Image (cartoon, helix red, strand yellow):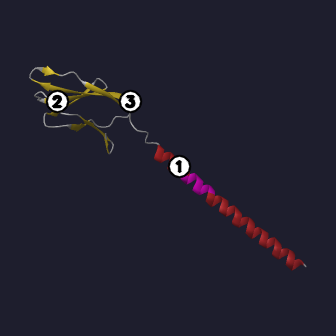
Amino acid sequence: MLNGSEVMVEWCEPLSYVTDYVVTVGGQERYKFSKDKRRGSIGTVDHVTQVCVSAVNDAGESQASCTMYQPKDRSLPLKLGLTGGALGLLAVLLMGVLVWRRRRQRKQEAYISSAQ
């Protein structure tokens, strides 16, 4: 789950007593959350990676529950903005050329009618 630019991890409470939850990102970064938490921020993740949550109590750490996190493509709004801007610029240039040609045509017509 995304919260702004940060990734939020959510989990359910197990049936057994828990002292902490440990979230592992990509098998390396470990985040510790207290027993009353059911979600937590793991910061920004900009690539596909495995995210695991395990519960901790006096007996040790549970088997981790894992899923693959795939960040959303955020370049779409940028692409749409650039495409829209380019089309807008093209439309303005086209209108400018049409107005210029129309004025030139009127000048030629005025010159021809005054020459007669």
Residue sitting at x 16%, y 29%: 14
Please name the residue that numbered disc 3 is placed on.
Answer: 48
Which residue occupies the extreme right position in the image?
Answer: 116
Few, some or many residues within 10 Å of mark 3 (<14, 14–19, 20+)? few
Q: Nearer the viewer, mark 3 or mark 1?
A: 3
Q: Position of residue 86 (x, y in %)?
A: 58, 52
Q: Amino acid at mark 1?
A: Leu
- The front one of 81 and 115 is 81
Q: Residues within 10 Å of mark 2 (few under 14, many from 20)?
A: few
Magenta stretch bounds = 84-90
- Establish if 110 lies above or below 56: below
Q: Nearer the viewer, residue 25 or 99?
A: 25
Q: Which is closer to the viewer, label 2 or label 3?
A: 2
- Classify the position of the N terminus by image quarter: top left
Decide: few, some or many residues near mark 1? Use Cα within 10 Å; few <14, some 14-19, many ≥20: few
Identified by mark 2, the residue type is Pro
Disc 1: which residue: 82
Of labels 2 and 1, the one closer to you: 2
